[in-house]
Image (cartoon, helix red, strand yellow):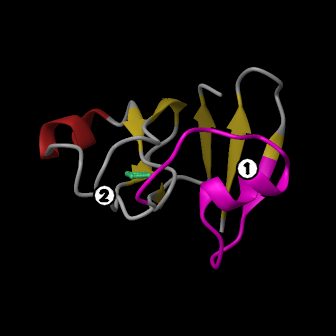
Amino acid sequence: SFEIKLSSTGQVLEIPADKTVIEVLEAHDIEIPFSCESGVCGTCLTRVLEGEPDHRDYFLTEAEKAKNDQFTPCCSRAQSPRLVLDI
Ligand code: FES
């Protein structure tokens, strides 16, 4: 598991191994746009302010992934213990 921190509110949420970031956000009534939920469409693309995503999508290029400044919360996870998101 890992944590996300929402930059707008400072809220910290735990993402368990069996839930996606989007599922946890929805459980807390935080809605972000999404569509495919499988890393293809890019609709859910979210800015990452701190931390290192574990990119599992097919949308970003390798160069974009390497910058670690955005990720797809429908399927991607984290390599660092915490991601700070621009939400
Ligand atoms: Fe399509 Fe996340 S919803 S990439």
Identity, as a three-letter code, of the amino acid under mark 2? Asp
Which residue corresponds to mark 2? 57
User: Residue 12: image x %, image y %?
Assistant: 81, 43
Q: Going by the picture, which residue comes out furthest to the front?
A: 35
25 horizontally vs 56: left or right? right
Q: Secondary structure at mark 2?
A: loop
Residue 22's image quarter?
bottom right
- Cβ atoms under marks 1 and 2 closer than 8 Å: no
User: Residue 24: image x %, image y %?
Assistant: 73, 58
Which residue corresponds to mark 1? 25
56 horizontally vs 25: left or right? left
How crowded pointer 2 is (Cα within 10 Å; few <14, some 14-19, many 20+) is rated as: many
14 horizontally vs 40: left or right? right
Q: Is mark 2 within 8 Å of ligand 1?
A: yes
The answer to whether residue 21 is magenta is yes
How crowded pointer 1 is (Cα within 10 Å; few <14, some 14-19, many 20+) is rated as: some
Identity, as a three-letter code, of the amino acid under mark 1? Leu
Image position of 23 with respect to 11: above or below: below
Residue visible at 84% across and 36% down in the picture: 11
Image position of 38 with respect to 40: above or below: below
Instruction: Give the residues in magenta.
Output: 13-36
18 horizontally vs 70: left or right? right
The answer to whether residue 5 is magenta is no
User: Residue 57: image x %, image y %?
Assistant: 31, 58
